[in-house]
Image: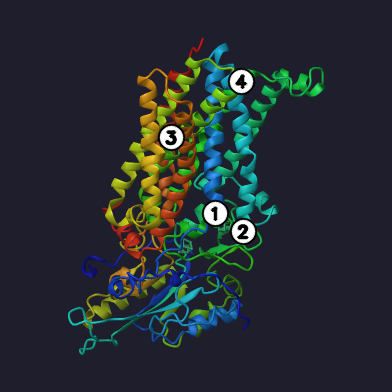
Amino acid sequence: MMTVDTGVRRWEHRRARSVGEAAATSYYGVPPIHKAHWRWSVALYFFLGGLAGASGVIASFARLFGGREARPLVRLARYLSFIAILPAPFLLIYDLGRPERFHHMLRVVKFRSPMSLGVWGLIAASATATLNAFRQAADDGMLGQRTPLAALGRRLPDRAIAALSVGPSFFLSGYTGVLLGATAVPLWAKNALLLGPLFLCSALSNACAALSVLLRRLGPASLPLIHRLERLERVALVSELILLVALEQQSGPVIARPLRTGRLGRVRNALLSAGLALPISVHLLVGQRRGRLPEALRHIATLFVLASGFALRILILFAGHASADDPEATFVFNRRGSRP
Amino acid sequence: MAADLRVGTTGARPGAMGFLTDTTLCIGCKACEVACKQWNQLPMDNFGFTGMSYDNTGDLGATTWRHVAFIERIDDHTGRRPVKLQPFQSNWLMLSDVCKHCVYAGCMEACPTGAIIRTEFDTVVIQQDICNGCGYCVPACPFGVPELSLTDRKAHKCTLCYDRLKDGLEPACAKACPTDAIQFGPVPQLMERARKRVEELHQQGVTSAYIYGDRAVGGTGGIEGLNAFFILTAPPEVYNLPAQPELPQRRVLPAFLSTAAAALALGLAAWRALRGVK
Ligand code: SF4
Ligand code: SF4
């Protein structure tokens, strides 16, 4: 028989703590389930997908309800949505290993598989993001004035494509939470109902932060518009904070262990303080001082919000891996009466 | 714990074929592991010592489709090996673990490509030419069975020897097992046999024996039973099996609904914030 490097086996993940002490109640502390192989590229995909989706939502809402004044926001949000979604298929292909494997994903539609729905959702969201950006580019004269391409772009029904993109955009920024929840990984499965909303809120706060900073820098946008955007960001940030605390609470002491200890515990502390509490306080200050706050402080807060979007995905992803490696977490989750 | 684990039924479909793995008969010879590797041409795992008694493969994986677990029972009170033997066996528990070929399979429902199918024998098989290595079936299995192989980056697991069944042969592991601890056959028949065996064991004084994989245990929460089930004599966790596993896909609809509700709320907030900027 030939020897093949099969990588790190499950039993090699045994936690030193579990071995002896847990030997009576589990199998030498070997994780009872396999964790997912997903690494940073998947976290980045979750983050960019969220950003693209939420920007698409903002673009559509601003286009449909915002009137003339909101035009600069519509423009920036449409471009941001398009640019953020561009790397998504490549990240997916990078994760699958080979380009032709992406096309296998399109064999079937399975409603009980968020992975299958997600690929179709990504395609729908990419299509609407492209249409919106195309229309915007035509309006902005980026496609030339008299070219057939520009004529085609200008003929796209503006409001209709804006309305069309709301569904896929929301889907793209939230489905990844459902995807994680529909596994046997204790931390994700236990919080299946919370992960989608959490990712949605985080995506919206990220998009608001990015767009308000872009508006300030690239203008021309009225201050009231920016303030409205910041109000939305505040709502999203506060909901995100509440959901994150709720997630930790309802996980219980065993399943939530990876959120509280070690390196991930530090990520979670940074996320809660610098990523959420700090921007929220800056927002409140801005509200009180009627915007008379140093520009730099706002930019730092924006940066922190964006970083927290990525940190949240990293935290949830890797804390999930850690909970899958912990036999006790799996067993606790799989006892009747401990599930949501 | 084991006392309330009732001998029950399975939701297997008509014509389902499966395994009954009777751990009380297992002698830990690993004939099944070897036969499986040989028949399915699975490469040997990294040569090394797990440090876990006589276990050299550790767990189920891409190249280990049968895995014999060796559970050495240490006396609870003194931390030493007990001096009194169980009525039927030594102080070892041995379990030849395998894919459960669930009646409703998490791996199969998760697979986005339709690579995982249910065969005419009601077993669950990954079609290698279609699997694209997305790895979603891996965390979707509540029993930690499938695994991505690093050589071809595709998911692999027990096929219940689909190729042998096609030719009217029994799976290699069942064929090789010298004590008939692994039995192959139609699921209802195996379940009948398992019930009789458990009764017999109870009469012999092994009152802790029960069937893992019926509706009462290991088949709740939408899984509705396992086509490859086990006779165990200790709580499932001792064998590294989840007590009440659940079908992960039962959470898909509720999770989508809660996400949609959040989208509605955030949409309302966005509408209120952005409307009528004049
Ligand atoms: S045990 Fe896991 S891999 Fe086997 S059929 Fe069930 S869900 Fe699929
Ligand atoms: S790794 Fe292969 S078998 Fe598993 S879910 Fe993905 S495509 Fe399906």
Tell me the kind of residue under disc 3.
Cys
Q: Residue furthest top?
A: B278
| Residue of label 4 | A160
x, y (%) of residue B148?
56, 64
Q: Secondary structure at mark 4?
A: helix
Question: Quick one: label 4, few (<14), some, or many (20+) residues within 10 Å?
Answer: few
Q: Is residue B106 visible?
A: yes
* Quadrant of ligand 2 in image: bottom right
CA–CA distance in space, label 4 to label 2: 38 Å
Check the image and tell me how it is coloured.
Answer: rainbow
Label 4 or label 3, whichever comes before in sequence order: 4
B48 up-or-down from A107: above or below: below
| Residue of label 2 | B131
Is there one chain holding both mark 3 and mark 1?
A: no
Q: Quadrant of residue A121?
A: top right
Disc ID at residue A201: 3
Q: Is residue A106 visible?
A: no
Label pair 1/2, CB-CB below 8 angstroms: yes
Question: Quick one: label 1, few (<14), some, or many (20+) residues within 10 Å?
Answer: many
x, y (%) of residue B24?
33, 81
Question: Quick one: label 2, few (<14), some, or many (20+) residues within 10 Å?
Answer: many
Tell me the kind of residue under disc 2.
Cys
CA–CA distance in space, label 2 to label 3: 34 Å
Q: Nearer the viewer, mark 4 or mark 3?
A: 3
Q: Secondary structure at mark 3?
A: helix
| Residue of label 1 | B111
Q: Secondary structure at mark 1?
A: loop
Label 2 CB sits under 8 Å from any ligand 2 atom: yes
Q: Secondary structure at mark 2?
A: loop
Q: Nearer the viewer, mark 4 or mark 1?
A: 4
Q: Choose between A175 and A116: the one closer to the eye.
A: A175
